[in-house]
Amino acid sequence: MADDLFKALADRTRRTIMDELAERSGQTLFEICSRLSMKHGLGISRQAVSQHLAVLEAAGLVETRREGRYKYHDLDTAPLRQITDRWLAPDPTGPQENTP
Amino acid sequence: MADDLFKALADRTRRTIMDELAERSGQTLFEICSRLSMKHGLGISRQAVSQHLAVLEAAGLVETRREGRYKYHDLDTAPLRQITDRWLAPDPTGPQENTP
DNA sequence: AGCATAGGCAAGTGTTCACTTGCCTATCAA
DNA sequence: TTGATAGGCAAGTGAACACTTGCCTATGCT
């Protein structure tokens, strides 16, 4: 569903999290928490960030990998292509069925 | 603010309106209403659509022009580039300060 | 003028959503 | 094994949001 994607992007804090993951991938929940606090002055609870990450993961924008007691988060920008494909399509001068 | 852009995109009905305007530009409020009803089976009031259009316009995704008692709506996909510029940037192989 | 059409303004309602609080599980070090 | 660190689950709260209802303005046709 594209619904999850746009809902995920709709929140400012989540977009900031994406920025941070874009700048430095493989961060843990606590790393993201402290970055949001330090760099962006966001006084937000750990649970809130965790929930945001869950939303981003549901949208396919974040992938996670567990190692021991750590859970690393990585950004995946691939779903964003849906947006450009939908409205910023290369305007093929007339609709085309598919391009194999 | 990019906030308006993402909030505007967050609603499914608004995205459908964008689709319709992409397919046929210069539609009036009533045209959009009947298209949503006919093609998409959306039982939605005229005011609701009007409010959606206002949100889209605030985000810069829709531009309007008045002629007599008609108000025509056109899609503007330019703001969508903010999204690709932010996370789908052409990967300059390392951060660069600015590109004048 | 009179009426229909196209659109706008504003208050009210129900739902969704972000965030918190409190407690619980799991991994690692001493 | 005890304690500390990293994370998860779930209920509760307040605000934002989509949508409706009712009424009002403006343009055009006859």
Image (tube, coloured by chain):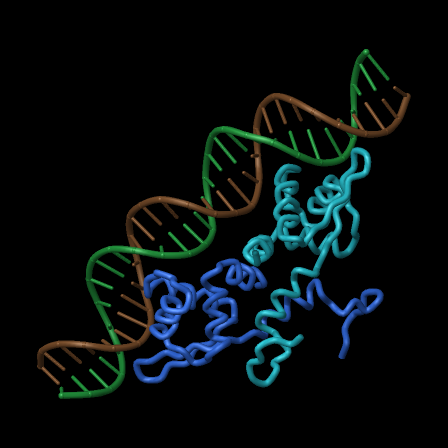
Chain colours: A blue, B cyan, C green, D brown
Q: Residue at x 35, y 71 (%)?
A: A34
Q: Please indicate whether residue B98 sits to the left or right of residue B21 in the image.
A: left
Q: Nearer the viewer, residue B93 or A78?
A: B93
Q: Residue at x 81, y 69 (%)?
A: A92
Q: Residue at x 43, y 77 (%)?
A: A73
Q: Please indicate whether residue B87 sits to the left or right of residue A23 in the image.
A: right
Q: Is residue D6 above or below residue A82?
A: below
Q: Is residue B68 above or below residue A7?
A: above
Q: For the N terminus of chain A, give its image quadrant.
A: bottom right
Residue D4 picture quarter:
bottom left
Image coords of residue B53 (percent x, y): 66, 45
Image coords of residue B49 (percent x, y): 65, 42
Image coords of residue B24 (percent x, y): 79, 52
Q: Is residue A32 above or below residue A8?
A: below
Q: Nearer the viewer, residue B49 or C11?
A: C11
Q: Residue furthest front?
A: B100
Q: Residue at x 38, y 62 (%)?
A: A42
Image coords of residue A49 (percent x, y): 38, 65
Residue A41 picture quarter:
bottom left
Q: For the C terminus of chain A, give its image quadrant.
A: bottom right
Q: Nearer the viewer, residue B10 or A21?
A: A21
Q: Please indicate whether residue A53 sits to the left or right of residue A83 in the image.
A: left
| Callout count | 0
